[in-house]
Image (tube, rainbow, N blue to C red):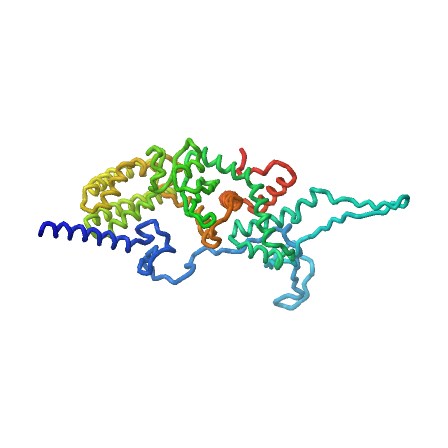
Amino acid sequence: MIVALQERLATLEARVGELEAQLGRNASNSSLPPSANPPQAPPPVVKTPTGKRRGAQPGHPPALRRRLPAQRLRDILPIVPTTCGRCRAPVPAQAGPDDPEPTWHQVADLPDVAAVVVEYQGCARTCPRCGEVTRAAIPAEVRAHAFGPRLAAVLAYLVGGHRVSRRGAEEIAEAVFDVPVSLGTVCHLEGQMAEALAPAHAEALQAVREAPAKHVDETGWKRAGARTWLWVGATAAVAAFVLHGRRSLAGLRTLLGEVMHGILITDRWSVYGGQPTHRRQLCWSHLRRDFQAMIDRGNAGRAVGEELLALSNALFSWWHRVRDGTLQRRTFRTRAGWLREDVQTVLERGRACRCARTAAVCRELLAVEASLWTFVDVEGVEPTNHHAERMLRPAVLWRKGSFGCVGEGGCRFVERMLTVVQTLRLQRRSVLAYREQALRSQRNGLPAPKLLPTG
């Protein structure tokens, strides 16, 4: 009976430890976002106070307003002195050759904004000979659209680029542009924009699939109340989004194709495990949260977590120096080789520790150990998946405000709008101008504008 009670006690203690670990999950030791932190969780970033006052510090370069060029100015109003500031003598009205350049101060304001409305009239005429009334028909291409491409692009831009609700876009159209529109019209214009952006979306998908290295991630989405998944693949110049019903290999293949090329920078989700280890880079930020979880459990795996976290601190300190140019990559490769041996030694020890969860994580990392170090040898590969997470952040905010989409058309609008908006932002190009051009080309039967620079 004593043996049985001891076994029962050990089982219950392990169960209590597991439940306490679940209660202690937060953004620092799991994949929970900071917005889902429990009240007792520590702040996501804990910084040691420096003793300096808030705001810009002495010597900080000022962020001055950019002076707009002369072609952007409606008026230039010179303010000319009339008398000398010292002797009060009259001064000439015209600038002399020795006079310095004038100072400047620009004031920007909006004019009265009202959409330009053109009315087409089908006129009727009575024949003086036979009395027949003949009415000219308004051309079908004119009657096909009640709103021009620029207004349609602006409304779609507000919804898909800045997460304005459809009712908000309806109100803005009337309050700002003095054009009353219905809620159904806003949705109809979204469908037109989604159709116009289809070639751009296909172009971005192809570019991501062919890229030698790409960041990949996924987040939850809603379609008619059902759970679905929004996938993203991103490089430095393009981001492509697709919606799929499963967080599975089928969803990943929808994004990257049946045959996947290049190096994937991802987290440890099992779907990415089919990629060869030399063509995959695990996100070290996710690993650091795993190491912190080992520490927070406070059991036999604590020492393993502390050692791994300290080694990752050293790795990132060197990597930051590589990025800012103060450490040569050749030197970094040598140091990372030493560190790799230490990490493997700690993982081997963690695999045999008495904490089952720590041992499981260490076994998983040892199985894909080569994927921890791809970024060391391959230039253009980052050690974290921050880029994909930044690309997904606007989508997450959109999801929180809109609760997803309803039908197939809404899904296509989400995919294509996010793809075009994030890609053009990466390229520092005008989102609104591109979408107006895309919609104008689609309406006129012309080729869609290129999303990616050529040459």
401 lies left or right of 436? left
Q: Position of residue 212 (x, y in %)?
A: 42, 33
22 lies left or right of 124? left
- Residue 87 vs residue 138, the one in the foreground: 138
- Is residue 209 depicted above or below 396 in this figure? above
Name which residue lies at 24% across and 46% down.
Answer: 357
Name which residue lies at 61% across and 67% down.
Answer: 86
- Residue 371 vs residue 63, the one in the foreground: 371
Q: Which quadrant of the view contains residue 84? A: bottom right
- Residue 101 vs residue 188, the one in the foreground: 188
52 lies left or right of 144? left
Name which residue lies at 55% across and 46% down.
Answer: 431
* Residue at far right of view: 129
Q: Which quadrant of the view contains residue 89? A: bottom right
Q: Position of residue 279 (x, y in %)?
A: 36, 33
Name which residue lies at 30% across and 53% down.
Answer: 25
